[in-house]
Image: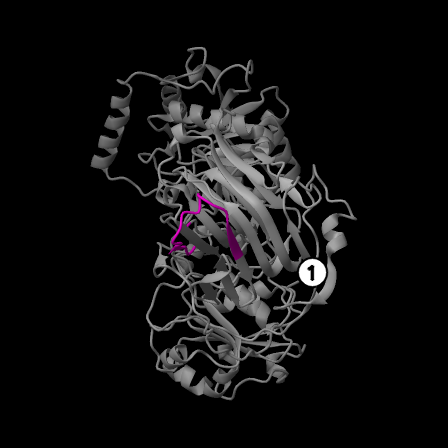
Amino acid sequence: MNLTKRMFALNRFLYRLQLQARRLLPRQRCQAFGSAHPDRRVERIYVINLDRQPDRWAAVKRELDQILDCSGNTLSERTMRFPACDARSFAGSPKADDEVDPIYTLRDQLFVEPQPRILPHRLDLDRPIQMSWQEVAVARSHVAVWRQIATGEDAYALVLEDDACFDWGFGRYVDRTWHELARGRNRTGPLDLLYLSYKEVIGGAPKSLLSPSVFRPVRGLWYLSGYVLSREGAQKLIRMLPCQGPVDLWINHKFDALEVRATRRSLISQRSDWDSANSYSILPALTRIGVLDCEGQSLFQNRPQQRPVFAFGEEGSGLTSLAMALSMLGYRCCSDLQNLPEEEWVQLLSGSSARVFDAYVNIGALMENVATLKERYPDAKFIVTTKKDASIKDKGVSLPDELSDAEVAVLHLNAVDKWKTVCEHLRCAPPISSFPEIADLGQRPLLEEDSREISAVTPPKEQRRDMSPWVIEPRPMWRGIRAYSPAGIASRVVFDDRFDSIDNERWLVRDDTFPGNLGLFRPANVACRDAGGAVLSVRRERLGVRDFSAGSISSRERFLYGRFETTLQASKVPGVITGFFLHRDSPRQEIDVEIVGKRSDCLMVNVFYNPGTEGARFDYGYRGAPTTIRLGFDASELPHRFAIEWGPDEIRWFVDDQLVHKRVNWAPTPIPQLPMSLHVNLWPARSRELAGRLAPRQLPATATVKSIAIEANLATSPIYDREHPVAPNSSIQRTALRATADAGVSYP
């Protein structure tokens, strides 16, 4: 999709003058282009060009003449013009066939671009949109190129549209990207598609950073004007046809089935001195929902516009699931309580914008105040959940008297598409993830504040936090929410491992890494001592993907609430972090104990929270909500005991059996509620802000883990590693017993 604004005559002249001036500079060299030996390189370039636009073909050849391949030949010498389909040759209305289905929906569009500036008062997600003939022609042109690549002999090919313009530094950046991809390919799988040209959606495309130059997009990349496609990737795309909707939109829906990568910045731009000949089918719809643009950094910088939201319903009708769904939409949601904390109650009923939350679900005390809520918030949205099958018109749903039928969305427990009901009412795009299904918690009473004193040498210091819907900014008088949670039955595990050796049924010694880690975890960096205890080390080693090695141990089981304690002696090397933490992905949740080498007399505790149930793709933020605590001793000099007590409504951190920090719900984050695995590691951090500048001359760095003791609820299913599966009669499973949980309701 190219929505580039037209240039005025003077700007067009200056732009073309700039392009001409670039040709006076030395030619770029790009080693990623050339023959397949000794490494697989991009061997062929296809330029999609209309027969009636030879000037564009000539212009793109001039661009390619400015870049040399690994043999010193210009890229134009390995370029083939590919005749584009011409929309002028078509007649009538587009019809579906094996290659292109011209009908798509507004839901498909909002999957890729979830946050347009404005949405209509009445949102219909399933509203059909018909592709224009120009869009059909573009899609057919790309499909034809894919077929050529799929049946050819080239391992990789670059596909360009004929308005491509290479950024200065293209060759150097592509070489760095190709090198990083080659190093990581044995861990991430073969490359199918690499975006060199793209525009991110409003708020930024959700992504995973894989290396300094490469990320893996989840969705949210417009344009398909410059990309590298492998032969295997082309074959996959052919099998996925027909293309439904514009090709750059459709391919976003296929990222799950492809190994897609993108350079950290777009390296090929579209010439802005040429008007686009395309006709965009979404534009008539966008005249009613707002014109798209593509600025911003984070998916949740734009908060939901329909606020506040109030939801009521009968017991067992899915209110807790609705609360989680609203959180996934970016709402700060308070739910399942008999009453609100006093300070929030006063702010809400007074109509103040200083309230903490913007969604309230299943709050018992609010049922008697619906008239006041309507008066204070005339634009508020109301949702009623029900187990009944009757429609609201048949009076099958009991509504507060103050609300009319038209003001309320009714969400049936067994509705097939709950996101459609909720998102059309709130005028927002559905998330990628499925609608959450969680057992209702009911209306819980608030508890008094925990009176136990916290032992700390000095008051904790709050660090910079993520700007997230699920992190509350510091504010006076707010102490979070403590609520009663009924006990449940769970499988329990109790053990105290002294690490005389590594129990491979209980622990996994890691051999991977992550973007913020300058080291590669290696089993050789975890060694058990004869007297007991495991020594983790960080060493300087050139390992291809990293220049340092590191050590990490992870539990094979996942846990849901409990006490996790370690006795360890931390490292003191600047830039190195000693970590003991619970963690999970999809959605990312984490509870941390970390000691950074530059300040080994301090403890950093942290919580990362993202909403959703198992598999929800939320990994927002990289700071979390950290707090630094002065220990009063140097944790690198002697072993000390560090413990995390994790319950459904409170987390407590202990040092040598002394409570040093505690958090309840929404102070400042919700409490993680999904199963997590336990980790202890030692690693060199990329972030100088977090850990300081790494001191390589002080390596090797070591940390000693004398023991780990766990008393916790087991998740219903263990993590099975493909290479190291847990035996059915593992020691953990033999130790597990049925018992009443100390706290909490298990989430499905």
| Residue 630 counted in the magenta span | yes
Q: Tag 1's secondary structure?
A: strand
> As drawn, is 602 to the left or to the right of 608?
left
Near-viewer residue (464 or 69): 464
Colour option used: one colour
- Residue in the foreground of this view, choosing between 195 and 641: 641
Q: Which residue is mark 1?
A: 492
Q: Residue furthest right?
A: 729
Query: At x 62% / y 66%, what residue is drawn?
Result: 438
Residue at image location 49% in from the left, 16% down from the top = 34
Could you tell me residue 31's position as x and y percent? Answer: 45, 18
Find residue 661 and report its horizontal and vertical position in percent. Answer: 44, 62
* Rendering coords of residue 673 (x, y %): 57, 62
The answer to whether residue 69 is above or below residue 551 is above
For the image shown, how many numbered marks are present on the structure? Answer: 1
Q: Position of residue 456 (x, y in %)?
A: 39, 60
Q: Tell me what residue is drawn at x 34 percent, y 33 percent.
A: 271
The boundaries of the magenta stretch are 623-643
On-image quarter of the C terminus: bottom right
Quadrant in the picture for the N terminus: top left
Q: State yes or no: residue 631 in magenta.
A: yes
Q: Is residue 456 visible?
A: yes
What amino acid is found at the position of numbered circle 1 in the picture? Arg
Whether residue 323 is situated above or below residue 51 in the rendered picture: below
